[in-house]
Image: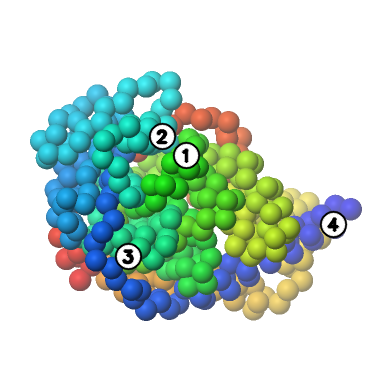
Amino acid sequence: MTDAIFIALQVLLAAIGVYQFVFSIFGMYTKKKKKHFEPRKSFAVLVAAHNEEQVVGALMENLKQLNYPRELYEVFVICDNCTDRTADIVREHGMHACVRTNQNLRGKGYAIEWMLKELWAMPRQFDAVVMFDADNLAHPDFLKEMNDDLCSGAKVIQGYIDTKNPEDSWITAAYGVSYWYINRLWQNSRHNLNMANFLGGTGMCFETNLLKEIGWGATSLVEDLEFTMRSVMRGIHPKFNYHAKVFDEKPLTFKASARQRLRWMQGHFTVARRYFFPLLWRALKERSIVKLDLALYGANVYIVLLTFILTAVLWADAAFFDGPNIANLYGQLPVWLSFTAIAANVLTFLTAMILEKVTFKKVYAYLVLFPVYLLSWYPITVYAFFTQNNKQWSHTQHTRVVRLEEVQSKQG
């Protein structure tokens, strides 16, 4: 019985790995530019901020310079439980500083829910809502790209999340590599196949009527994934815009990165518990590959956990109990096939960097430490599993002031 369970797990994990690798192939190409429309959609640009006085000014300058009619968008910064000069800096730049104070309901999801209620009560109503984080920088054509997608019928859109500081440290480089892979070989592949994309927490756009109809309702530690699940459950597939770039600041140290990723994984466990089985059931009932794909993405946190446990058990069996005492299907495979599978996984990240024409020299040098970043997901996920009921929101401090011109010049 035990052997049957272990063999079933190994087959399942191998099948999921092959499934994801095959899907990544469809991200190798990018679709031709879509139809362009004259600017006609109006946008409420929401910026979530908690004590962001060091970086929010750069974003305010950036948002003034978007290639979009100024009368068609307004910027609202959610100054959520701020104790610094964030609100003052926003007002100095002529933007709306919306001050929220609530020590009980803390976190980005709650702040957005509060801001949307404020927005619906205002005299002016907008066609769509765009969301950024305070440490971001937006490509000048971001709103033009969102306008094109909205005019083409999209209701929920995710932009391309890039890294504004990939050369600051080995950990920011690791984030950069991960996001280039996610954008090109995960998000873009789903986009090319007309499937649902997942939201990434920033660079998001929502049709106003949709938000009013279904509400925000995403207040977990990963509000982006939660809203993605809710949308797909209703048959609304978020779209990916490869050309709408937003540059995000990544943590400089491993400690800060681990704290951020722990929060993500804790939130992922919550969302997986809530949505995986309902979404899987609908996928099977409707024979929907879209819903099945997103259900697997939602359960990815359990896939990582099972992979770690299975690997640890097999290694412990071999090292301490004169194994094999447990059925090891992988051990029956030719050695060359195992190395080929490992090489294929490594090459997907390098392939993504080549396809994205990454020119950051330091990032290539930091690749030697990239496996450390990847392996660190395992203990973080295990710890998140045992602390998943911790709903306390933790703030990632942002200090890296970068202007868009600097980012674009380094990209060549």
Circle 2 sits in a helix, a strand or a loop, which is it?
A: helix
Circle 3 sits in a helix, a strand or a loop, which is it?
A: helix
Mark 3 surroundings within 10 Å by alpha-carbon count, few (fewer than 14), some (14 through 19), many (20 or more): many
- For the residues labelled 4 and 2, the Cα–Cα distance comes to 48 Å
Q: Which residue is mark 2?
A: 113
Q: Which residue is mark 1?
A: 215
**Front disc: 4 or 1:** 1
| Kind of residue at badge 1 | Gly
**Front disc: 3 or 2:** 3
Circle 4 sits in a helix, a strand or a loop, which is it?
A: helix
Residue 88: x %, y % from top left: 15, 30
Mark 1 surroundings within 10 Å by alpha-carbon count, few (fewer than 14), some (14 through 19), many (20 or more): some
Q: Which residue is mark 3?
A: 148
- For the residues labelled 1 and 3, the Cα–Cα distance comes to 24 Å
| Kind of residue at badge 3 | Asp
- For the residues labelled 3 and 2, the Cα–Cα distance comes to 26 Å
**Front disc: 3 or 4:** 3
Q: Which residue is mark 4?
A: 3
Sequence-first disc among 4 and 2: 4
**Front disc: 2 or 1:** 1
Residue 265: x %, y % from top left: 52, 43
Residue contact between numbered discs 2 and 1, judged by CB atoms under 8 Å: yes
